[in-house]
Image (tube, rainbow, N blue to C red):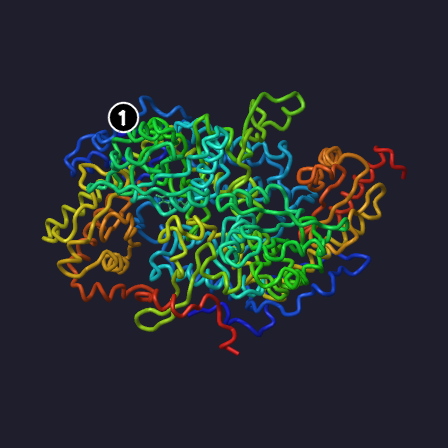
Amino acid sequence: MSHLFNHSGAENTGYSQPQGLASVNEPSIPKGLLRQQSARWPRLSEPEMVRHYTWLSKRNFGIDTGFYPLGSCTMKHNPRVNEVIAQLPGIADIHPHQPEHHLQGLLSIFYEMQHMLEVCAGMDQVTLQPVAGAQGEFTAIRCIQEYFRQRGETQRTKVIVPDSAHGTNPASAAMCGFEIVEIPSLADGRMDLAALAAVADETTAAMMITNPNTLGLFEADIKEASQIVHDAGGQMYYDGANFNAILGITSPGLMGFDAVHFNLHKTFSQPHGGGGPGSGPIGVKSQLAPFLPGPLAARRSPTAQESSSAVDEYWYHWHQPEHSIGKVQQWHGNAGAVIRCWAYYRRYGNGLKTMSEHAVLNANYLRHAIHREAKKEGVSHLFVDGAETDVAKHEFTLSMQPAKEALGISAMDVAKGLLDKGYMAPTVYFPLVVPECMMIEPTETESKDTLDTFAEQFVQVLQTDAETLHAAPVTTPVRRVDEVYAARNLCLRHPFEDAE
Amino acid sequence: MDSITDPLGEMNVMVDQLPNRGREAEMLQSMGLETMEDLFVDIPSEVRFKDELPLRGPQSEEEIIADARRLLGSNVAMGGRPSFIGAGLYRNYVPAAVFQLVTRGEFLTAYTPYQPEVSQGMLQAMWEFQTLISELVGLPVANLSLYDGSTAAAEALTCAVRVHNRKATQANTVYVSELIPPDKMSVMENYCQGAEIVIKTLKHHDDGTLNLDELKLAAGSCGVYLEQPNPLGILDEGLITVKDIIGANTALIVGVQPISLGIVEAPGHYGADIVVGEGQPLGSPVTGGGPLYGIFACTKTYLRLMPGRIVGRSIDVDGKEAYCLTLSTREQHIRRHRATSNICTNETLIALMGAMHMALLGPDGLRDLAHRNLAACQCAKEILASTKGIELVHAAHHFNEFSIRVPGSAKDCLAYLDENGIIGGFDLTTWYPQYNDQILVTATDQTSLRDIEALSAQLAMWSMHQGVSA
Ligand SMILES: Cc1ncc(COP(=O)(O)O)c(C=O)c1O
């Protein structure tokens, strides 16, 4: 083990600094504010620090390490040129409050991204302000709330979500102050229109739903759902976490939605960074546009004076929507993430559809390959599709319930068995509507060979005896981690006290 | 299907990202399908795009990087000229090792460590981050980041209400310094309105320090939010007494500039219950305002109602030390609409950069860095104080930044400086319309004497144009 806090005592610092500036009077702070005890931070030289973090990195699994079929997260390859671009001083070393003529390049990229997302989503206006999907949800629901307040429809206090929805949907709506109405899915995992019709009324502010849904199925009735909600006077919100399935094929706008968030860290390859950062722009139809958080990038013809700083035939400027809800984070969104996603977009351009086609191709191919391999090996009775369908979209679910009942092998056991095979496990136990759920999303950047091998290995895991699987993983840096122990014996920081 | 049968053409540039280009037919066939279209039969034609997306064509890597260089190259980078703009984000030097290590794919391309057995690296790094932050601010608990300093402050307010509301004599009420910038205030309002929390403001004296007499009004509310240094860069000794005034059942929430804590007392040591802040100065460039990371630390009282992910140290089945996410029952994926926050994706990688920077600095390095920032600020203050036409607005101790009064409009003055190649600071009119002759000048460890002298010379020149005699 390498422990950061074991490096102490020596005089080392890993970072030698130049002298500070000299002043006439010694710089000072109020006496009572002088720090009495310095932080017990470690003392490391640079070589020790580099080794520590390199050692840690070797105990971590990323897309670069291997196949990462984490459903609902779109773990696609992150093109490396995007990282190079994000380090250029024209993004890394700019301040959001610099004047517009200092930021024409940034503004033009923001404008291009807003436009591209508007086109892909069929929305009238996009803002790049929210910094993650959940924040996009929160922002859009806030806009819907203000829209109804302005119309005097303050009785609209409820937001409808299907029981298969991601946890952030109800959490975001509740943070805005809405009451959550959860509607059950049908047995096949699809939305229940009758259940929706039964709850949609004059108290409905919005319905939040993703399509393809969290089982990877396209909700063919989506227009009817939009109709029901619109007839009740509510707004339709599209959770864009599954956008990777539909670029260039269909759009939330065509399906009748009024607002949508994008997870740029999923669909547009901002690296997930071990948990973040993300970027969660939202797009809305015109009735909601005046409420968006600003600033938005806008453009017009330059004046003679402006044209010297212009990057093309337009002058780009910030624009504040008329009835803006205000800010959801302090600056201009995760600009660095937007730049990476812009570089990603440029690689595909109007070929984004090809990307989505390949995402769907890979998901369906893998689903077939797993079923085929399982049949061949005689283990196809150990799992069923989370939802019956001819074609899935960019991801699919399997239920391990039969294996659980027959052999005592849970979805978690299979997940841990896959870790031993050198894979990241799929998403497990989500969506909640599928018992013993495994949600598999290969993305378009995995080769056929990888998918074939994964199918074989997946089936091999199912052929492994329960005892071995309960004990899995054995090849990983640590074996199964005791989460109950962690919660009962809370140790949330280095216990210096014990060491003394 | 023409994208398959057309082996050349510009669509081909995406081959380097799509390993199965050219193998589509074979893959489809294995499923008993013929065309890509067969994969989309479940999408009704009435919701299908009829035409190709009206977007530009694809580009190769070389074309993309050339366009990026051209467009981003047209932005004015702060490092290319004397620059004095801060106002919440601070130009700093991030050591090279941080950038080199953070692009390791095992960190960069992982996601939330749901499978702890193969995520020990990031989990341990975040547990260490929690320790580093906890030590820095003087509180026992820290999470592994929120979106930015403003959402951390906003979530601190809602957290304080969850914890204190039952006993509060001013239920659903929090108090916030009147100096908090409107953009940050707006974030707080958006986060608070759903829970019907009332945000009241706290007055400051003309010298920029908190009015401690008025602070008594906040006793019995759920929480008080103040910043140290405050938004005008002032180090306010009065904050040390705040906790005594507001009492045990009102949360003292302090927003910090983390580097200042190399010399300024940790708020946890003068009674803060929650400490938040913009983590950016530790580990990250300004990056146009994001991605950043929000610091959130607190006492154990808030632990079970706080927002964000937390890593705990545990053991594996062999009893070996191991790390995993813990206290997840607060979070949206379990608690859904009753979660303490909706946050899911956070700012882990930027927090990791922060951890790396902190690890390199060590306690002495942090103190030195804080001193350099203090020294740059002091030096700039002295030079500008003796610049013709310029006045310091507040006689106080400052960290990083201070306000100056110019003879005329701040906006015009900054425009003049800009024409002369200097980013002169932040126009305080943006925050406080009444301060139309004030500029917030920021100096950091990256500010040189030559930069300050250039600013002084141009300010003197502009003052002269304004009719201030030499
Ligand atoms: C279906 C769905 N909705 C919403 C979210 C929330 O997005 P984020 O994690 O970017 O906040 C996620 C991702 O985690 C998701 O999978």
**Res. A138 visible in picture:** yes
| Residue B414 x/y as whole percent | 73, 36
Q: Check the image and report above or below for A445 versus B363.
A: above
Q: Pick the residue in front: A449 or A302.
A: A302
Q: Is residue A109 left or right of residue B123?
A: right
Q: Pick the residue in front: A97 or A205.
A: A205
**Res. B427 visible in picture:** no
For the residue labelled by badge 1, is the local secondary structure a helix, a strand or a loop? Answer: helix
| Residue B266 x/y as whole percent | 62, 63
The image quadrant where one finds the C terminus of chain B is: top right
Q: Check the image and report above or below for B106 versus A485.
A: above
Ligand 1 closer than 8 Å to the CB at disc 1? no
Q: Pick the residue in front: B394 or A93.
A: B394
At x 61%, y 22%, the residue is A302
Q: Check the image and report above or below for A218 versus B170.
A: above
At x 51%, y 66%, the residue is A48
Q: Which chain carries label 1?
A: B
Q: Is residue B136 left or right of residue B6?
A: right
At x 20%, y 37%, the residue is A391
**Kind of residue sitting beneath label 1:** Asp
The image quadrant where one finds the N terminus of chain B is: top left
Which residue is at the far front?
A: B169
Count of numbered marks: 1
Give the class, few, some or many, for how many residues have Cα within 10 Å of label 1's Cα (few <14, many ≥20).
few
Which residue is at the far right?
A: B469
Residue under label 1: B2
Q: Quadrant of ligand 1?
A: top left
| Residue B161 x/y as whole percent | 52, 54
| Residue B81 x/y as whole percent | 68, 42
